[in-house]
Amino acid sequence: MDGGTGISGAAVGVLVDVGCATAISGFTVGSNRAVSALMRASRSIRRDFRGPLIVRLRAPAIGADQPTARDSTLLKKLIPEVPRVAVLWNPGAFSEQTTVDMVSEATEAAKSLGLQLQYVEARRAEEFKRAFSDAVNWHSDALFEFPNPTFYENQKRLVDLAAQHRLPAIYNAREFVEVGGLIAYGANILELNRRTAIYVDKILKGSKPSDLPVEQPTTFDLAINLNTAKLLDLTVPPLLLAQADHIIE
């Protein structure tokens, strides 16, 4: 996996060799980095994808859950009294329309749950500390993140900062929970890699990349770290535990 881009290095090589471009664009781990890597790799690549992100779909995307809205719901279930939630994001990570959609989805979900959102920006890892300080200064009761390759590549740093500030945080990949994060809801990365392999196989067998749909994830995992919950003096509701796909005790 190329640092959370949603497409493996081996797949990039195969796609370049066959002289075409395709990618699996995931809400959680897909990004314009996968497209950029392909575009840099060969001048012969078909430009069905353009920066900063896909500009059109050749076929309807496979339906997916709404992780950003789910983040707010999970936080409310875990901490019913939470009123103020910080949103860690990188405004330049996705296309303008994708960013607008994500913000709109988060806003609607927060409104329905009675939450106040405060966006804290971090475009680079060096800005993490300042972003968390902004969240704390705003008296945030919890935090969730918009998907971003930089965040995915720096899981431990983000988890450690959340622990340092005793800030309950929900992440978008199970790997965050495995390094000490409280809770995560996001696309199954192994499934994304499997779908990438299927794409490569179809292309090598003669399928036109332009005829293949740009897929979004359909398999999502809920992971909970009970050790972290204990350190934060949080009791995870039994119903939420029953819904979890992965529990770290």
Image: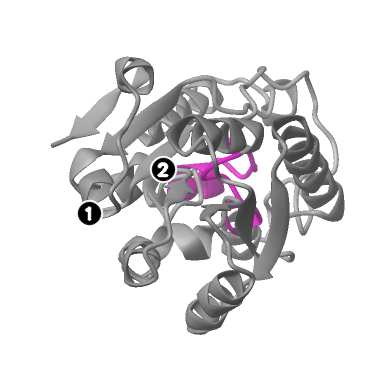
Which amino acid lies under the numbered mark 2 shown in the image of this protein? Ala
- Identify the magenta region: 11-35
Name the foreground residue: 116 vs 64.
Answer: 116
- Does residue 164 appear to the left or right of 248 in the view shown? right
- Does residue 22 appear to the left or right of 248 in the view shown? right
Residue reaching furthest to the front: 81
117 shown above or below 165: above
Q: Circle 2 sits on which residue?
A: 173
Res 104 quadrant in image: top right
Which amino acid lies under the numbered mark 1 shown in the image of this protein? Leu
Residue 172, position in %: x, y? 48, 43
Instruction: Please name the residue shown 36% across and 61% down the image.
Output: 155
**Magenta region includes residue 29:** yes
193 shown above or below 140: above
- Does residue 206 appear to the left or right of 13 in the view shown? right
Q: Circle 1 sits on which residue?
A: 231
Residue 181, position in %: x, y? 32, 51
Disc 2 element: loop
Res 118 quadrant in image: bottom right
Disc 2 crowd rating (10 Å Cα; few below 14, some 14-19, many 20+) is: many
Residue 138, position in %: x, y? 64, 70
Name the foreground residue: 61 vs 9.
Answer: 61
